[in-house]
Amino acid sequence: MTHTRYAFVKANWHSDIVDRALDGFLELVPSEQVDVYDVPGAFEMPLMARDLARTGRYAAVACAAFVVDGGIYRHDFVAQAVVDGLMRAGLDTGVPVLSVSLTPHQYQETDHHNAIYRTHFVHKGREAAQAALMISETRAKVAQAA
């Protein structure tokens, strides 16, 4: 069975920036084919991705977050845990889980940086959509050949 639905999970932390990834994703995948889910932050994405993938409804699950050094704990640890968790969710379920989880080396909450990252997230969302469509098509070909 070929699925044509996609899940898009987005972290609410820095939502003014992260939500732009969904904008980019929807440039290539019709909104009627996308179910959108919000989570508090990046750390919650792997569990949600795994749960969504296990439903069997989605060809792929895309996850977007902006992990920055907020001074509370090491952002590089969080970013690594998130990416590892997303990869594991995909491998454990057999459903592609795509990451638009970005961890900039330099980020300051200025209008200049916010504008740069809003634009960048649109681009990364578009790339996630391209990846979702391509992996769906490739997997369908593999399934037909089997």
Image (cartoon, rainbow, N blue to C red):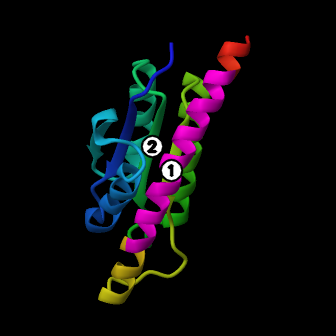
Tell me which segment is drawn in magenta: 119-141
From the viewer's side, name the closer residue of 106 and 121: 121
Mark 2 and mark 1 lie on one chain; the one further toward the N terminus is 2
Residue at the (73%, 11%) spot, across then down: 146
Residue 117 percent across, percent down from the top left: 41, 74
Q: Residues within 10 Å of mark 1 (few under 14, many from 20)?
A: many
Amino acid at dot 2 = Ala
- The local secondary structure at tag 2 comes to strand
Residue at the (57%, 45%) spot, across then down: 131
Badge count: 2
Residue 38 percent across, percent down from the top left: 27, 45
The CA distance from mark 2 to mark 1 is 7 Å
Q: Is residue 15 above or below residue 108?
A: above
Q: Nearer the viewer, mark 2 or mark 1?
A: 1
Q: Is residue 130 magenta?
A: yes
From the viewer's side, name the closer residue of 144 and 113: 144
**Residue 102 — which label?**
none
**Residue 128 — which label?**
1
Q: Is residue 9 above or below residue 22?
A: above
Disc 2, disc 1: CB below 8 Å?
yes
Residue 145 percent across, percent down from the top left: 73, 14
Q: Is residue 93 magenta?
A: no
Residue at the (70%, 21%) spot, across then down: 142
Amino acid at dot 1 = Ala
Tag 2 residue: 62
Q: Do we see residue 78 in this rendering?
A: no
Q: Is residue 110 left or right of residue 28?
A: left
